[in-house]
Image (spheres, grey):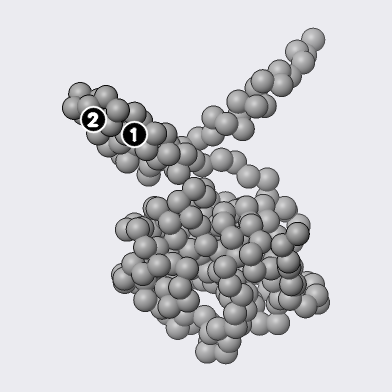
Amino acid sequence: MLSKPNDDDGLLSGILVPVAREGWPFIGLFVVISGLLFLVAEPLGYVGLILTLWCVYFFRNPDRVTPSRDNLVITPADGVVQMIVDKAPPEQLEMGSEPVTRVSVFMNVFDCHVNRLPCDGRVGKLSYIPGRFVNAALDKASDENERQMVRIDLHDGRQIATVQIAGLVARRIVCYLQDDQAVLAGERFGLIRFGSRVDVYLPAGVSPLVAVGQRCIAGETVLADLLSGESSRAGEVR
């Protein structure tokens, strides 16, 4: 006889989520510093404990439920849609010089920073550019900051680009992908440490299904539908 699921199990699974392996060295460092602060001055130790808990929260790596229908583009990052503009893809990705729609999702230091693939396909090009660390909220961050660029070749011959951009306090971009790797929408492909942005370049003629100011969930929020003829959406705070 099957036992009835415990409601507490579902609650705990929503709180006690896995932690990205890249976060453990930072968490360990925070623990050591907190212990030293407790020895020096107990009130400072509690400050260190709070920061340690924040570090664990920052590197959380929860599972996500990704829509599995073909031709959907899924948001690769948690955060807020900061801007939607027409801009040519990075020349390093060899996608041509014609402007396409670029959607930028900004992650603050409280967002989950594990990034996920926006679509099914194959990795066609990878390019890493060392750079500056200006505020990721600025448009020029796409051209000046440290960034990891990924071109995904779709099965129908079209291409989508995803660019991880380091932010003001970020100093490390992690990308797990390799050239010619087969990928699925919603799969984890990397992370950015401590505040950053992810840009998505859509194929020509494809309009986003999100609006500026909208909060997105990586691996779940539908960013665009490659088969849709809907025009770009507008949104308002209500």
- Which residue position is annotated with label 1? 47
Pinpoint residue 206: horizontal percent, then vertical percent: 70, 77
Contact, mark 1 vs mark 2 (Cβ under 8 Å)? yes
Position in image of residue 47 (x %, y %) = 34, 34
Residue indicated by mark 2 = 37
* Residue 60 in picture, x, y percent from top left: 49, 40
Whichever of callouts 1 and 2 sits on the residue coming sooner in the sequence is 2
- View extreme (top): residue: 1
Image quarter for residue 170? bottom left
State whether residue 122 is above or below residue 47. Answer: below
> Residue drawn 53% across and 84% down?
88
Cα distance in 3D space between marks 1 and 2: 9 Å
Q: Is residue 134 above or below residue 113?
A: below
Q: Residue at x 27, y 37 (%)?
A: 29
Let me know if residue 20 appears in the view: no
Q: Residue at x 49, y 48 (%)?
A: 110
Residue farthest to the bottom, as pictured: 98
Q: Position of residue 91 (x, y in %)?
A: 45, 83
Indicate the quadrant containing the N terminus: top left, top right, bottom left or bottom right: top right
